[in-house]
Structure formats: C-alpha cells, structure tokens
Amino acid sequence: MHLSLTELGQWWLNGIFHDGRRYTVFAIAVWFTLWVVLRRLIRPRKIREATPPARQLVLELMFSLRSIAVYSTVGIGINLGERAGLYPMSGAAQHWGWAWFVVAAVAMIVAQDAYIYVVHRWMHRPRWFRTFHRRHHKSNNPSPFSAYSFDLGEALLMVGFVAVWPAIFPTPWGVVDIFMFHQIFRNTLLHSGYELTPARRDGRPWFDFLTTTTHHDLHHAQAAYNFAPWFTWLDRWFGTEHPEYQARYAATAQRPMRARPEPDRDLVEA
Ligand SMILES: [Zn+2]
Ligand SMILES: [Zn+2]
C-alpha cells in the first residue's frame, strides 16, 4: 500500500493521540481510585508515609506522555516494517491458533522481563545513569504517573524490545496488544504507592514469583536492588533482591485493615 506523507503524518498523529489518551485515562483512573476514592479505606496498605507533591505528578505525566509518543512513533515503524515483510515469522504465526497465541504471549512477557533486567542493571552503571535513567529516579517516591517517566534514551531502549522481538520470535500481532496492556497495567500499579497483593499466612505474597509494588518501591528508594519489572526470579538468581524485601512487604500487607488509620499527615501538611 502506498501512503502519501500527509497520510503518514495523520496516521502518526492519530497513533500518538490514541496511545496517549489510553495511557492518561488508565493512569488517572488508577490514581483517582487509589489516591482519592479508596484513600482512607486502604490507608494501612500505603507503603510510605509521605505523599509526593502534585508538581511531581504533573511532571511525571508529561514525561510519560513523551515516552508514549516515542512508543507510537516506533509503532508506526513496526507497522510499516510489517507491510514491507520485515516480520515473516510473526506474519505466519497469525494462523497458528490460540494455543500458540498463549505461548507467544507468555514468551514475550518473560523475555521482556529478562531484557529489562539486563538493560536496567546496565543503566544503573554510573557512566550511563545520567543519560538514560536519571529521569525515572527523580521519582524517589513514585506515583501512578511515574510508570513511563523516562529519559528519551530509556524510552527508546524500552520500545526497542517491541520492535525486535516479533522479528526473532513468531508473535501474532494480537499478542503485542495484550503485551502492551499487561505492561501499562502492571507498571502503573507497581508505581502506585499502595501494596495491594494479598499476603499468605507466612507473610509472603500470593504468587510470590510476581513482583509486588513493595518490590519496585524499594528499587526507587534504594537503587541497588530489585531490577526486574514483572517476576522475582532474576533478582533471586543473581542475588539482587533487596535483603529486607519480604519483611517490608509483610509489614505493609499484613497491617490490620481495621487498625485505626494513622492521622492523615498529607492533609495536615498540605
Ligand atoms: Zn520505576
Ligand atoms: Zn532503576
């Protein structure tokens, strides 16, 4: 199909608008539900006493929208690449049925976890940190809007995985949509400041192989630990899980819900 420059520009703007709106609506919905509507009810599950100032949230949203614009732009490139036949395996996988769809979805999410683990540790090297990862760590105390608050280099590294993976692993295109949804959903909750994963009797989280909000919150607090985004496997295998992760998780997740809420400092301080 031949596209004129005007059509391409329109396509690009539509993509940015659509993706930006989807992310903003989701992040605002999470923020409004947890930080406003359920605020008092889930007070015992708040990980930190302090609440970030509104100024931080607005800046994070702006930087996240810039990252989403980078994602949309690369997304157009992927789409054009598909038309040009750059993804033959993924083209074939469109017809391999639902069982392959499930395998490909799990494979893409697990592979991304490993990719981010490696790239994330690399970005924390002093030589690269300022250029690639400083913006994200300006949010020492994260919010639902921190999820994509990235430097441009980090945004490109993140979307680079989405551009390359379907070229090397047969991935039906519907899987990429599910992958993106999983990424926005988990990422926003990991930065939400509330520990919502229920605890087992022994104090560990249900589905302990999945990361929790406490897990990623500890990374923002003390950057030397907890590099993996979705699963706890790699930090455990490579000895980078925060030594107090389980204890900190249990302290928040097992705090009695009926406990009298502590005085709401944020309101007093405001
Ligand atoms: Zn983060
Ligand atoms: Zn980091």
Image (tube, helix red, strand yellow):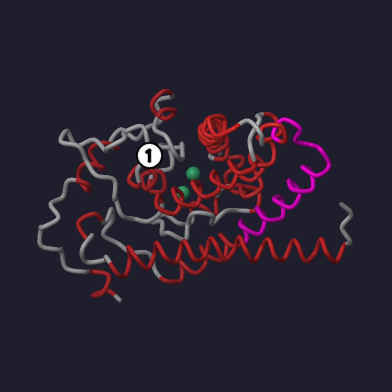
Task: Tell me which residue sits at (69%, 50%) in the image.
Answer: 75
Where is residue 175 drawn, in percent x and y? 58, 41
Q: Residues within 10 Å of mark 1 (few under 14, many from 20)?
A: many
- Residue nearest the observer in this picture, 38 or 249: 38
Left or right, 59 with respect to 199, comes to right
229 relative position to 90: left or right: left
Q: Position of residue 23 (x, y in %)?
A: 53, 60
Label 1 CB-ligand 1 distance < 8 A? no
SS label for mark 1: loop
Say which amino acid is labelled 1.
Thr
Q: Is residue 119 left or right of residue 76?
A: left
Q: Which residue is mark 1?
A: 211
Residue under the image location 41 percent in, 28 percent down: 233
Report the number of discs: 1
The image shows residue 3 at horizontal and vertical percentages of 87, 57
- Span highlighted in magenta in the image: 66-90
Secondary structure predominantly adopted by residues drawn in magenta: helix
- Residue 128 figure quarter: top right
Residue closest to the eye, 50 or 46:
46
Quadrant the C terminus occupies: bottom left
Residue drawn 32% across the image and 70% down it: 36
Query: Residue 207 location in percent, x, y?
Result: 31, 35
Residue 200 included in the magenta stretch of the image: no
